[in-house]
Image: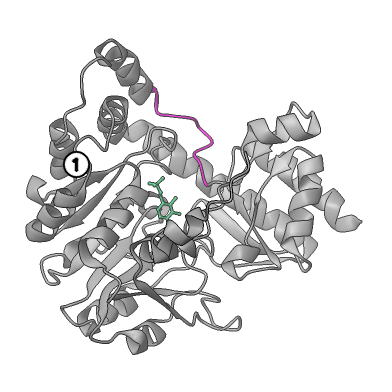
Amino acid sequence: MTCDFDFLALAAPGVRMLQPYPPGKPESELRREYGLSDIVKLASNENPLGPSPLALIAVREALSGLARYPDGNGFALKTALSAKLGLSMSMLTLGNGSNDVLELVARAFLTPEHEAVFSEHAFAVYPIVTQAIGATARVAKANRPDHAMPYGHDPAAMLELINDRTRVLFIANPNNPTGTWLKTAELETLLAAVPEHVIVVVDEAYVEYVEAETDCPTALPWLDRFPNLIVTRSFSKAYGLAGLRVGYAVSHPQVADLLNRVRQPFNVNSLALVAATAALADLDYLERSRTLNRAGMQQLQAACRHWGLNWLPSVGNFLCVNVGRPGREVFLELLKHGVIVRPVDNYGLPDFLRISVGAEAENARLIAALGAVLKD
Ligand SMILES: *Cc1c(COP(=O)(O)O)cnc(C)c1O
């Protein structure tokens, strides 16, 4: 379709400069392009167990109700979350994935006059929601490669960028794609140092995978002390519901009220609501997810050790590996073996690949393919 009309000139200034989020390559695309059938996808940090069996039952039961609008307040899911987390329902905001919640934060608190701060190598959605509003993104230098937490968030660098125009600070803990995290003392000190006019978003998409002995805290207990804190979580990772899109924010009730004002009335669909409620109660599934991740992480790290490859510390369900050459080239070679991983050159990590932890056989396929590619 050709047209001389300049739509770009019509677009809001922030939108003109936007680069769309590059998602993991879908299996179906690789099947079409390469004619491959047996494909392993370790590219989007999805749960290799598939969805929780209880969530599947709930979805099947809810199918016949699809002619009705969903519960726009998500009462059942909020009740379950509030019981599980031990906090008031008025502190919860549901989202169409936690990405939706991140966008609600930007729409509620940012304007073209304001700034958002986040780190280099941080989750790609922060710059997108910031720019879409026309607000200014201030990107803090990350830790240097020789730091104990290489490429991780540097609290001092973040604080330095905060000024009167700053309205939002995005922190991913742990961060994707690096896997790195801020320790309890670091995060607490940072929260205490941030002025009250700055909303601090602590994105805890991987919190369920964090082992008890790792010093990677959840920020939930600090909500009482810091009214400007928003904690976001997701059902896409350990709860295995990436395809349904559910996430939530926990915040001061007045902040939740603002987020709910900009929310679409039915942003979380009926199937997502029942599935998330059921998955939350499926403790057995969550435990199996964690156990599988622990074993898979060992399996991937053992292979990297064997090849002499370095990886970044990770408490998530993925490993960011330095492949010692352009990661995008290795990614393309792996595609020929039917293995999809994630190049992270767009995150400023050109020599790295982000590999999601899969089931044992999937990891074995990746290891065999990567071994073959690295030998060439
Ligand atoms: C995967 C991920 C999310 C979750 O996104 P959803 O919209 O809930 O699927 C949020 N933050 C980070 C850092 C992630 O990696």
Prevalent SS, magenta region: loop
Q: Is residue 194 above or below residue 297?
A: below
Residue 267 point in image, percent of width and height: 26, 38
Residue 167 highlighted magenta (yes or no): no
State how the image is colored.
Answer: one colour
Side of 27 where 207 appears, left or right: left
- Position of the C terminus, as image quadrant, is bottom right
Residue 48 highlighted magenta (yes or no): yes
Is residue 30 in view from this perspective? yes
Side of 80 where 114 appears, left or right: right
Residue identifier under label 1: 81
Side of 183 where 266 appears, left or right: left
Residue 73 point in image, percent of width and height: 14, 36
- Looking at the picture, tell me which residue is in the foreground, 55 or 340: 340
Query: Which residue occupies the extreme front position in the image?
Result: 4
Q: Which residues are magenta?
A: 45-53
Q: Is residue 208 above or below residue 216?
A: above
Q: Quadrant of residue 195?
A: bottom left
Q: Residue at x 16, y 33 (%)?
A: 72
The local secondary structure at tag 1 comes to: helix
Q: Residue at x 77, y 66 (%)?
A: 308
Q: Residue at x 36, y 58 (%)?
A: 212
Q: Quadrant of residue 31?
A: top right
Q: Amino acid at mark 1?
A: Leu
| Mark 1, other Cα within 10 Å: few <14 / some 14–19 / many ≥20 | many
- Looking at the picture, tell me which residue is in the foreground, 29 or 107: 107
Q: Is residue 370 above or below residue 180?
A: above
Q: How many marks?
A: 1
